Image (cartoon, rainbow, N blue to C red):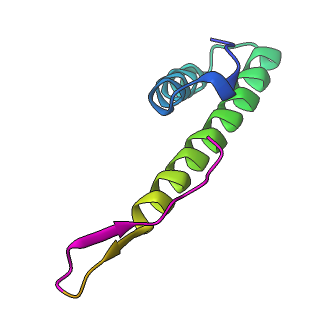
C-alpha cells in the first residue's frame, strides 16, 4: 500500500480499494488510521472512475458502418 495512486493499474487500485473497505468495515482501526484509510480509498475510487470513464470514451469512439460493424476508430487522447 501507499504506492503513488497514479502509478497503479486499474486492477491494482481496485484490489487496494477492496482491502481498505474490508479494513474499515471491521471497525478496528484507530480513528487516525481510519481517516487515512478513508482518504486513500476515496482517491483510489476516483482513480478507478477516471480509468473507467476513459475506457468508455475509447469504446464510444469506435465508429460503426451502415450495417452496424466497426468501420473506423476515432483517435482518443485521454491522459491515463
Furthest residue to the bottom? Answer: 66
**Splitting the image into 4 quarters, where does residue 68 fall?**
bottom left
Say which quadrant the N terminus sits in. Answer: top right
Residue range highlighted in magenta:
67-80
Residue 9: image x %, image y %?
Answer: 51, 27
On the rendered structure, is 71 left or right of 63? left
Q: Image check: 69 left or right of 64? A: left
Whole-percent x, y for residue 38 in the image: 71, 30
In the rendered image, residue 74 lying in the magenta stretch gets the answer: yes
From the viewer's side, name the closer residue of 76 and 17.
Answer: 76
The magenta stretch spans residue 14:
no
**Residue at horizontal 75%, vertical 13%?**
30
- 34 w.r.t. 75: above or below: above
Q: How many marks?
A: 0
In the picture, the quarter occupied by the C terminus is top right
Of residues 55 and 20, the one nearer the viewer is 55
Q: Quadrant of residue 65?
A: bottom left
Residue at left offset 56%, top offset 19%: 23
Amino acid at each position: 500500500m501507499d504506492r503513488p495512486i497514479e502509478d497503479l493499474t486499474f486492477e491494482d487500485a481496485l484490489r487496494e480499494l477492496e482491502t481498505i473497505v474490508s479494513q474499515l468495515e471491521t471497525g478496528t482501526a484507530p480513528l487516525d488510521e481510519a481517516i487515512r484509510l478513508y482518504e486513500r480509498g476515496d482517491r483510489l475510487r476516483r482513480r478507478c472512475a477516471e480509468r473507467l470513464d476513459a475506457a468508455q470514451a475509447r469504446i464510444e469512439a469506435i465508429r460503426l458502418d451502415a450495417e452496424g460493424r466497426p468501420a473506423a476508430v476515432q483517435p482518443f487522447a485521454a491522459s491515463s
